Every structure is written in structure tokens, then in C-alpha cells.
Amino acid sequence: MQLVDSSAWIEILLGSATGRILLGRLPQKSEWVVPTLIQYEIHKWLARSVSADRASEFISYSSKCVVVDLDSDIAVRASDVSRLYKLSTADAIIYATALQRDAELLTCDAHFQDLPKVLYMPKQQA
């Protein structure tokens, strides 16, 4: 299982050098964990930066993956990892979701770099 963080999604959607590398690392939809928080973040970004149609297409695509709602178990785990690793609320929820689903977190955000079960891909220069 793999959870693709918003930072990685954005690189992929931008078609950046990093995004092109990440494309080769994406899992099958049946192995792709998508927290509803990621759906929110990417939908908001696409609607603001690209178009409402692209935002809707993203929701349609990501809904075919393993969508995970925020529940009490993930919330408590997020609280713990937030304190332990000094993560923001959103990052803690995303990371806790990955841990809860025994998924690797694929990210371009350096603050996740040294955490367990994280595949960090630094942004490449074009």
C-alpha cells in the first residue's frame, strides 16, 4: 500500500521533472491509499489553480483508489504523531492514515524525510 501526499500529487499534476519521476512510482489503484484530506487539498488546489472540471476529474479518479475517511483511531494516532514528530494537523492526519493502513508515504515534503515508512522524493530542478 502507498499513500501519495499532496506535495507529490501536485508535482505529478504539474508535469514537473519530479512529477515525471514520481509517475513511475505510483501504485495500482487497489494499493493506493487516498485520505479524504488529500481529496480536499488537491480539489481545492485544482479548483483554484486550474479549473473546476480538473478538480472534479481528480475526485472521480481518486475515488477509485482506497479512500480513507478520518475516524477516531486515525485522529488519536494523528495527535500522537503530531506531538512526536512536530507535524502540523494536516500532515499528522496524512501520516497517521499511512501508518494506520500500513502504507508507505510518498512525498516531496522535507519535513517527512526521516520518518519511518516514508519515501521522500526531493523536488528536481527543471
Image (spheres, grey):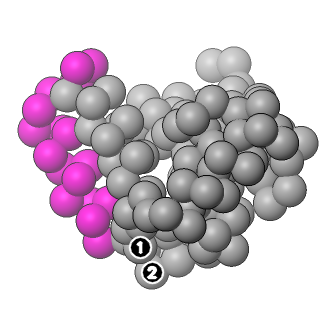
Residue 26 visible in the current orientation:
no
Q: Point out the image quarter for the N terminus.
A: bottom right
Q: Residue at x 53, y 37 (%)?
A: 90
In the displayed image of the protein, which residue is found farthest to the bottom?
30
Residue 37 visible in the current orientation:
yes
Q: Are marks 2 and 1 in contact (CB under 8 Å)?
A: yes
Where residue 105 sits: x, y (%)?
Answer: 67, 55
Where residue 86 sits: x, y (%)?
Answer: 78, 31
Q: Residue at x 42, y 30 (%)?
A: 14
Toward the viewer: 55 or 81? 81
Residue of label 2:
30
Mark nearer the viewer, 2 or 1: 1
Q: Residue at x 71, y 40 (%)?
A: 82
The amino acid sitting under disc 1 is Val
As for residue 29 lying within the magenta part, the answer is no
State the mark number for residue 66.
Answer: 1
Where residue 38 sits: x, y (%)?
Answer: 42, 46
Location of residue 48 with respect to 119 vertically, above or below: above
Image side of residue 25 versus residue 37, left or right: right
As for residue 58 lying within the magenta part, the answer is yes
Q: Secondary structure at mark 2?
A: helix
The amino acid sitting under disc 2 is Ser
Part of the protein shown in magenta: 48-64
**Quarter assignment of residue 88:** top right
Q: Secondary structure at mark 1?
A: strand
Q: Point out the image quarter for the C terminus.
A: top right
Q: Magenta region's main secondary structure?
A: helix
Location of residue 82 with respect to 99 vertically, above or below: above
Q: Residues within 10 Å of mark 2 (few under 14, many from 20)?
A: few
